Amino acid sequence: MKLKNQWFSSESVSEGHPDKLCDRISDRILDFYLSKDKNSRVACETMASHKDLYVSAEVKSSYRPAKKELKEKVINLIKETIYDTGYNKEWQYDPESIKYRIHIDAQSEYISQGVNAGGAGDQGIMFGYAANETPEYMPFAITYANKILLKYGELRKNGTLKNAGPDAKSQVSVWYNADGKPEKIGSVVLSVQHNSNVTRDGKNINDEFKKELYEKVIKPVCGEYFENPYPEDIHINPTGSFLLGGPAADTGLTGRKIVVDTYGGMAPHGGGAFSGKDPSKVDRSAAYMARYAAKNLVANGLCEKCLIQVAYAIGVEKPLSVMVNSFETGDTSDENLAKIVADNFDFRPKAIIERLDLLRPIYYETAAYGHFGRDNFSWEGKAPVSISV
């Protein structure tokens, strides 16, 4: 996307957001199967609503415990995930009081036969994007929306923010100047779950807690980019108190935060969610590869922005199309950039899995704070890699 003399905003959500909690549970179950059999194929969905939690999955794996044993193991994994996210009796979402409904069945053989032959696990389109706006080669707004919540989570977990709960949302608005460069942050929204120790009149959080969130979370992350100091354009819990969060307050579902997971709306999205899917599903693996290719084109100085689209047919090995758009920022034409991508990046599903080493239990860590822009993932890695031009 090309922006000049315009504002652009992106939001993020914490690991305790009900949808993100469901993503984490789905990816935790995926990792569990991959730890037992690296060739496991998993499609796992989670829904959490008040005191009911549903897991529905289709699985093909050499790991086949008895149904009762599997149910017990999955429930224990879910409980561990809920506790790890920060929920317990204090935060009104007690893993020991939830009714778990687990449905895990075999994957269709009609899907398996195409994937076994090296084809894509489904049809669809996927996008990868990169820009030289940040050291992470990510869009500015989603990068800082994620950084705010990463900082919030760090301080919540280490006890610095004693009254803060697991559920939170952030939003950052960025001004792009006449040169199309991010210049300043105009506003930040931060809404956080909290306990009653910081409520005022039962309707709002007190000024001391607001100041603490600004001084310890927002200012260290975004302060250098603010044109106006606090409290102008800083919105902390603008609706008032946020005493009840997570699935106790709102239904969560796997795959409902796909823009948060990717580029914050700066780039298109093919529509397929990531969490709960093994890498034979190109919804996930091809999106990772497209990001990997786009990032390395930008990191090698071939363009300032890069969008890659790739399309597949179920059971077909080679992608049907690969498109590159540099938004007129390239040193060469988009046609030549597409040839460079074809020469350096193999988008066949098995080749993606091998190059990015995806048959590992690595996915739980991806399920909050974005799948891109953090160096601990193989599709991010250290850029640039050597590219033949």
Image (spheres, rainbow, N blue to C red):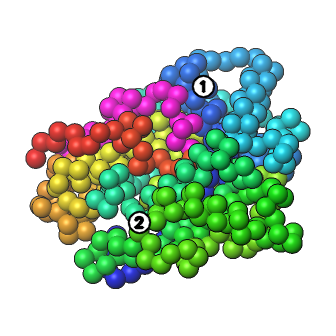
- Residue nearest the viewer, comparing 134 with 344: 134
Identify residue for label 1.
Answer: 33
Choose top left, top right, bottom left or bottom right for residue 298: bottom left
How far across and how far down the image is residue 314, in percent? Answer: 45, 43
Of the 4 image quadrants, the one containing the N terminus is bottom left
- Say if residue 179 shows up in the picture: yes
Judged from this view, the residue extending furthest toward the front is 208
Q: Residues within 10 Å of mark 2 (few under 14, many from 20)?
A: few
Amino acid at pointer 1? Tyr
Amino acid at pointer 2? Glu
How far across and how far down the image is residue 259, in percent? Answer: 51, 59
Q: Is residue 240 above or below residue 108?
A: below
Identify residue for label 2.
Answer: 224
Q: In the displayed structure, does residue 216 sit left or right of residue 294?
A: right
Which residue lies at the image location 39% right of the left edge and 29% below the top edge? Answer: 357
How far across and how far down the image is residue 287, in percent? Answer: 41, 48
Q: Residues within 10 Å of mark 1 (few under 14, many from 20)?
A: many
Label 1 element class: helix
Which residue lies at the image location 32% right of the left edge and 53% below the top edge? Answer: 135
- Say if residue 307 shows up in the picture: no
- Residue nearest the viewer, comparing 53 with 348: 53
Which residue lies at the image location 84% right of the left edge and 58% below the top edge? Answer: 196
Label 2 element class: helix
Q: In the displayed structure, does residue 133 sit left or right of residue 198?
A: left
Q: CA distance from mark 2 to mark 1?
A: 44 Å
Instruction: Give the mark count.
Output: 2
Of discs 2 and 1, which sits in the foreground? Answer: 2
Q: Which residues are magenta?
A: 342-367
